[in-house]
Amino acid sequence: MADAKCNVLTIHQTIPIQGRANVTLSLDVTEMAMELNAFLQTLKKLAFVESADVVSSGAY
């Protein structure tokens, strides 16, 4: 998150089962240093990330 210049607003995590948990991050991306799709692809390449999706952009 820091490399992409995202500010973490909230972190929600489910109870880990067999070493895995769902984690939802709310991020302030107004100063993000890369495109959102590139950021998602970077997250998905991490060994400990199974999936990464945008739930809401907050834009109207």
Image (cartoon, helix red, strand yellow):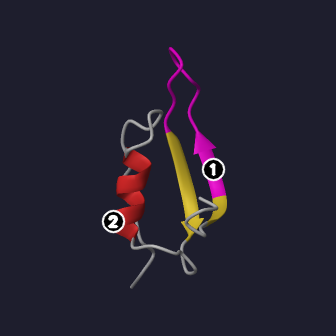
Residue depicted at x 36% and y 42%: 51
Displayed quadrant of residue 25: bottom right
The one nearer the camera, 10 or 51, is: 51
The rendered magenta stretch, by its main secondary structure, is classed as loop
Magenta segment boundaries in residue numbering: 10-22
- Badge 2 marks a residue whose secondary structure is helix
Displayed quadrant of residue 38: bottom left
Looking at the rendered image, the quarter that the N terminus falls into is bottom right
Going from N to C along the chain, the mark reached first, 1 or 2, is 1
Query: Does residue 55 appear in this view?
Result: no
Left or right: 54 in relation to 12: left
Displayed quadrant of residue 37: bottom left
List x then y, in percent, for residue 45.
Answer: 38, 44
Residue 16 within the magenta-colored segment of the rendering: yes
Question: Circle 1: is it few (<14), some (14-19), or many (20+) Cα within 10 Å?
Answer: few
Residue 18 within the magenta-colored segment of the rendering: yes
**Residue located beneath label 2 in the image:** 37
Are dots 1 and 2 in contact, CB under 8 Å? no
The one nearer the camera, 18 or 5, is: 5
Residue depicted at x 56% and y 60%: 26
- Badge 1 marks a residue whose secondary structure is strand
Q: Amino acid at mark 1?
A: Ile
List x then y, in percent, for residue 48.
Answer: 48, 33
Identify the mark at residue 11; answer none if there is no mark.
1
The one nearer the camera, 6 or 15, is: 6
Tell me the CA gap for discs 1 and 2.
Answer: 21 Å
Query: Does residue 7 appear in this view?
Result: yes
- From what the image shows, is residue 53 above or below residue 46? below
Residue depicted at x 42% and y 71%: 57
